Image: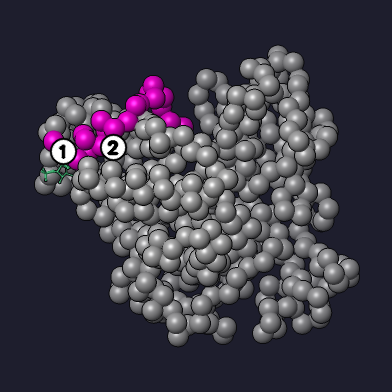
């Protein structure tokens, strides 16, 4: 890792078993079978480095309190890469930097080489028809795709870096087919997708000859599925691809929903491998319908976060057990509270109990010592407004709060409006004042005060 910001710290390397030697000022990472160079321009602390790479910190993992600013070569998962980026680019304490886009070591940056074919000239243009079996016409061994990233990005209306990220993270990994169109209505129903959203999804279905689906959209759908699938079992937040201009039509609007549908079979297989009951699989995956309905209420404002959130479901990272969603990873189970009616103390207690039995049974290799939650719901300032017997206040009392730290890249005032009013942009004066909470949110902000995003823990 480079000390590119000129810090005075002594360069050190932090090696884990299996890590390879690195080169100065650069970082060698291996994603599945692909090797990359990744430049990092901010030295992470030893603890952050371990968390970024492994998601878990044990005392023995941390060899030093000093910052790491030597060079180091490691093995990264998709998740590690996302975490590393988040942590390296956070602001505060003067520590703000950049993680460059990984650059492929072994292949020309803009080309995908068919490994078995070994004929580098056999590229399939995006607009060239694909064979029914998904292979390009002239390559007997597999799919060969030539992607002009600049052109693809321009046609998709997104930054080229975002397209490059998909290209690199998905690599030539396996995609997954969508369910048969005839089966889709029943599946959408099982996923709690409401009739208006289901109708739109069916109307935009990526049929082979559909004019709604440009070659670029088809490429992105295919590679987005591969990108998420490559991290099956992962539990970090993983954007499935760029934020699309969704107003362009149903294919644009629901591209990541089609990816979700393609991954349902993959993730239910993963669940079965872990002995997870069908009922848990489907209630968990039915968060798709809930999110689509909320996004409709939010006139599309909610989707950019939802498209990343929902990759946790299709990778087996989140399980809905009773009232709460339980998110694997690290040493704590992260709790999420879906919008599904009041959050009574009894329902919360039952859900925690379910999780206490669920994780040791289905993920015996993972050891959890706490439940954790990061939310506007844990802001003690709410107690100034809510009655002592409110469910939110009772929920708060379960947690031991960590000291307040302003979170990076997240504005709690905006998040409160997301969850309480389902809007991010309505002026304060126009927000409804129907419930005690709604009045509290508005009055607090109008008084010039701010809401806080707080993090707390409950021992398992
Ligand atoms: C978490 C949640 C279930 C709590 O609801 P609850 O169990 O009714 O909570 P309380 O008993 O503490 O409610 C106290 C008051 O606030 C109101 N209230 C609670 N959550 C509200 C919400 N999201 N929007 C509007 N009003 C809300 C209640 O109606 C009640 O007001 P009233 O007495 O005037 O009717 C609810 O806020 C919700 O569904 N939130 C969306 C999901 C969310 O925020 N998840 C966390 C993301 S980090």
Give the camera-side residue of 380 and 437: 380
Is label 1 within 8 A of ligand 1 (CB to nearest ligand atom)? yes
The quadrant of the image that shows the C terminus is: top left
State the count of labels. Answer: 2
Magenta stretch encompasses residue 238 = no
Give the camera-side residue of 311 and 223: 311
Is label 2 within 8 A of ligand 1 (CB to nearest ligand atom)? yes
Question: Is residue 446 among the parts visible in the rendering?
Answer: no
Disc number for residue 377 = 2
Describe the element under mark 2 as helix, strand or loop. helix
Of mark 2 and mark 1, the one earlier in the sequence is 2
Q: Splitting the image into four quadrants, where does ligand 1 fall?
A: top left
Q: Residue furthest right?
A: 119
Residue 271 drawn at (x, y percent) = 51, 61
| Residue ID at (56%, 62%) | 273
The quadrant of the image that shows the N terminus is: top right
Residue 163 drawn at (x, y percent) = 62, 56
Residue 359 drawn at (x, y percent) = 47, 48
Q: Which quarter of the picture shows residue 98?
A: top right
Give the alpha-carbon distance from disc 2 to disc 1, as whole Å. Answer: 12 Å
Describe the element under mark 1 as helix, strand or loop. loop
| Residue ID at (61%, 36%) | 52
Disc number for residue 390 = 1
**As displayed, is residue 389 above or below residue 47?**
below
Q: Which quarter of the picture shows residue 293?
A: bottom left
| Residue ID at (25%, 27%) | 380
**As displayed, is residue 99 above or below residue 94?**
below
Question: Is residue 382 among the parts visible in the rendering?
Answer: yes
Q: What's the magenta region?
A: 389-409
């Amino acid at each position: 890792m480079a000390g590119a910001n000129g810090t005075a710290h002594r360069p050190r390397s932090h090696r884990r078993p299996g890590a390879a030697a690195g080169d100065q000022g650069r970082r060698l990472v291996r994603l599945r079978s692909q090797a990359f160079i990744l430049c990092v321009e901010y030295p992470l602390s030893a603890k952050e480095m371990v968390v970024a790479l492994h998601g878990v910190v044990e005392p023995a993992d941390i060899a030093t309190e000093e910052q790491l600013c030597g060079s180091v070569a490691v093995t990264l998962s998709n998740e590690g890469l996302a975490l590393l980026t988040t942590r390296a680019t956070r602001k505060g304490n003067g520590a703000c930097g950049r993680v460059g886009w990984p650059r492929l070591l072994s292949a020309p940056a803009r080309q995908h080489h068919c490994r078995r074919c070994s004929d580098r000239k056999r590229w399939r243009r995006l607009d060239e028809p694909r064979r029914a079996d998904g292979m390009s016409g002239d390559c007997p061994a597999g799919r060969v795709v030539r992607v002009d990233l600049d052109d693809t990005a321009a046609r998709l209306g997104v930054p080229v870096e975002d397209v490059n990220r998909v290209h690199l993270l998905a690599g030539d990994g396996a995609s997954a087919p969508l369910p048969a169109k005839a089966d889709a209505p029943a599946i959408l129903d099982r996923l709690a997708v409401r009739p208006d959203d289901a109708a739109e999804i069916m109307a935009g279905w990526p049929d082979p000859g559909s004019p709604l689906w440009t070659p670029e959209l088809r490429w992105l759908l295919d590679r987005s599925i591969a990108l998420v699938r490559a991290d099956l079992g992962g539990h970090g937040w993983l954007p499935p691809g760029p934020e699309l201009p969704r107003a362009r039509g149903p294919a644009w609007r629901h591209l990541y929903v089609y990816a979700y549908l393609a991954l349902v079979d993959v993730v239910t297989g993963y669940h079965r491998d872990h002995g997870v009951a069908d009922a848990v699989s489907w209630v968990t995956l039915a968060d798709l319908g809930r999110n689509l309905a909320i996004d409709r209420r939010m006139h599309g404002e909610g989707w950019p976060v939802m498209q990343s959130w929902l990759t946790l479901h299709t990778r087996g990272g989140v399980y809905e057990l009773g009232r709460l969603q339980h998110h694997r990873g690290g040493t704590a189970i992260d709790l999420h509270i879906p919008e599904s009616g009041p959050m009574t103390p009894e329902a919360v207690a039952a859900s925690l109990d379910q999780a206490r039995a669920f994780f040791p049974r289905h993920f015996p290799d993972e050891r959890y010592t706490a439940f954790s939650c990061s939310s506007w719901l844990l802001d003690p300032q709410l107690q100034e407004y809510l009655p002592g017997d409110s469910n939110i206040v009772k929920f708060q009392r379960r947690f031991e709060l960590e000291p307040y730290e302003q979170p990076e890249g997240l504005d709690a005032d905006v998040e409160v409006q997301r969850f309480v009013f389902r809007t991010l942009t309505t002026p304060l004066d126009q927000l409804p004042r129907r419930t005690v909470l709604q009045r509290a949110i508005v009055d607090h902000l109008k008084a010039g005060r701010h809401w806080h995003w707080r993090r707390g823990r409950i021992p398992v």
